[in-house]
Image (cartoon, rainbow, N blue to C red):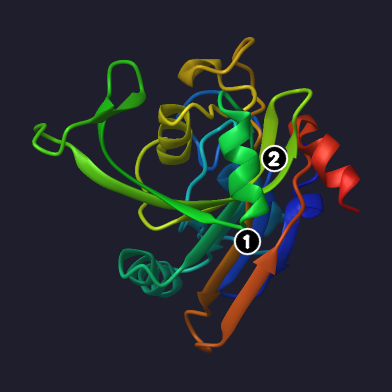
Amino acid sequence: MKDIREHIIYEDSDICVCHKPSGVLTQSDRGFSQDMVSALLTYEKKKGNKAPFIAPVNRLDRPVEGLVLYAKNSHAAAALTKQITKGEVDKCYYAVVNVSDMEAVERAMHDKKKITLENYLLKDARTNMSRVVTEDTEGAKKAVLEYEVLDVNADEKTAFLKVKLHTGRHHQIRVQLADVGMPLIGDAKYGAAGKNGDNLALCSYRLVFSHPVTKKKLFFETEPKGKGFEPFINKNK
């Protein structure tokens, strides 16, 4: 990430919307890895803001790309966090997955069927992984998402999905899709072929929320840049 300005989709005095690249942290983990918050703070200082405030409102895993919303003051942070808590922020993702049952996936695409997945997930802090468990498992949290099959590549046994989150659990999309035989391309951690890397075929492409000050409804979309998306994105241009 050479210049943070290349990744800023929108900004004003209260908020900043960025397309976070895959492999970059949403915010610092106190290590030496590149992160968006540090880059934005440096950018604000260069503009003459001596005491900049940057706080992420939503977060993406390091290997996931896409839209992240940042607040530039505590009032905006509180108002936007309240929207997140109330489920008033609309977040949609694109995903490319390996497919174990191509016939079922092709049928879902033909029928333009929206499929809802409901599970209970348990996070293991030691391994930084989550897994599907039964409802009565101590510490389990309900996870709900909805997906639609947009396209398939039968030869490669892959599919291009649109995913809408109804909850925000740890590794939710990765875990729930893997549980139904559709692990994300590049996500060996949850069952995909190959090795784990900085790039997962998962992109937060749409973000809809109300401005914390003006209350105006704001709608943002971006296009995936990861290699895993190229066969589908180029095909549908």
Q: Nearer the viewer, residue 135 or 140?
A: 135
Residue type, numbered disc 2: Pro
Residue 187 tag number: none
In the depicted view, which residue is nearer to us: 62 or 86?
Answer: 86
Badge 2, how many Cα within 10 Å: few under 14, some, many 20+? Answer: many
In space, the residues marked 2 and 1 are separated at their CA atoms by: 15 Å
Residue type indicated by callout 1: Arg
Q: Is residue 173 above or below residue 90?
A: above
Q: Secondary structure at mark 1?
A: strand
Q: Nearer the viewer, residue 184 or 64?
A: 184
> Residue 32, can we see it?
yes
Q: Nearer the viewer, mark 2 or mark 1?
A: 1
Q: Are marks 2 and 1 in contact (CB under 8 Å)?
A: no
Q: Position of residue 26 (x, y in %)?
A: 54, 42
Label 2 or label 1, whichever comes before in sequence order = 2
Using the image, determine if residue 117 lies above or below residue 198: below
Q: Residue at x 79, y 23 (%)?
A: 155
Q: Quadrant location of the N terminus?
A: top right
| Residue 194 appears left or right of 211 | right
Residue receiving disc 1 = 206
Instruction: Tell whether 218 sits left or right of 80.
Output: right
Q: Which residue is mark 2?
A: 21
Residue 95 shows in this picture: no
Place of residue 42 in the rendered image (x, y in percent of width and height, measured from the top left): 66, 48
